[in-house]
Amino acid sequence: MSSDEETATLSEEAAAYAEGIERAEEAFTAASESDQGGPVEEVEPEGGEVPIRGYDEETLKRREMALSQIVQYGDPVLKSRASEVKEFDQALSGEIERMFELMKDGLGVGLAATQVGKLRRLLVFQTNADAVPQELVNPEIEWLSDESEVAAEGCLSIPRVIVEVERPLYARVRGRDRTGAEVLIEASGHEARVLQHEIDHLDGILILDRTEKPQRKAAMKALRRGEAYTPHED
C-alpha cells in the first residue's frame, strides 16, 4: 500500500469512528420502529449479540433502552485497554448485576465493562438461554487452539453491523468471580468465541479490527450512512 493510500484509509477510518456513535444510535432507533429491523435473517451473529428478529415491541423497547446505556461505536473508551480489578467488594457485585441486566435487556450474550464506560477488566456472559449468567474478573486467555473458524459476529456497541471474524474454536480462560475465587473455563465453539470477543473489548479491540479489510471498509461506510451491514451486502 502506498503512503497516499494508507493516509486515505486512515482518514476514512477516523471519519467513520468519529461519526459512529450518532449514526449507530439513529440506525437502531429507525430499526426499532420498523417491521424490517435487525440483521439479515440468514446471518446470525455469534459474538456479543443475538439476532433481533421475531421479538415483540416491548422487548425491542427494552433493548433500545439498554443500548442507550451501553457505550456505542465512536466513543474513545472502546479503543482503550482496561485496568485490572483490585477490589472484590459490594461495588463490584453491583456493577456485575447491572451488566447482567443490560446484557439481558440488550439481547446480548456477552458484555464487557468497557462497554458501560468502566475501564475495568470485567466481563459477563450467557451463551445459552438456560444457563446462569456468569461474570469473569481479570480474565486471561491461557491457551487457544490452532483450529479456527470464520463466523458472523455482532456487537452491542455497534448495533446492526455484522462482520465475519476468524477465531480459534477452543480456548482456556482463567479469571475470578465476584468474590475473588479462581475460575477456569475450558470453552469451545460459541462460548469460546464470545469469551474472545469480550476479552478483545477489554484490550480496546473491536470486531471491525478483526475482520478482513473489504468488510471493515464496507461496515464503516454503512455506519457513516446510518445503515445496517451484513457480509451478504459485499
Image: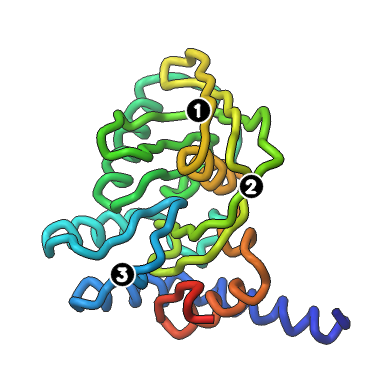
Tell me: 110 left or right of 121: left
Tell me: 166 left or right of 39: right
Residue to which mark 1 is pinned? 137
Q: Quadrant of residue 58?
A: bottom left
Q: Nearer the viewer, residue 47 or 92?
A: 47
Tell me: 124 left or right of 196: left
232 over 183 or under it: above or below: below
Residue to which mark 2 is pinned? 148
Question: As shown in the figure, which amino acid type bears the numbered disc 1?
Answer: Val
- Do the residues under discs 1 and 3 have CB atoms within 8 angstroms? no
Report how far apart the C-alphas of labels 2 and 3 lie in the structure: 27 Å
In percent of the image, x 56 and y 42: which residue is there?
196
Q: Residues within 10 Å of mark 1 (few under 14, many from 20)?
A: many
Viewport quadrant of the C terminus: bottom right
Q: Nearer the viewer, residue 225 or 184?
A: 184
Judging from the image, what secondary structure is the residue with disc 3 in?
loop
Tell me: 37 left or right of 95: left
Q: Position of residue 168 (x, y in %)?
A: 63, 44
Judging from the image, what secondary structure is the residue with disc 2 in?
strand
Question: As shown in the figure, which amino acid type bears the numbered disc 2?
Answer: Ser
In percent of the image, x 54 and y 35: which residue is there?
121
114 over 221 or under it: above or below: above
Report how far apart the C-alphas of labels 1 and 3 lie in the structure: 31 Å
- Do the residues under discs 2 and 3 have CB atoms within 8 angstroms? no
Q: Quadrant of residue 101?
A: top left
Q: Position of residue 11 (x, y in %)?
A: 69, 80
Residue to which mark 3 is pinned? 38
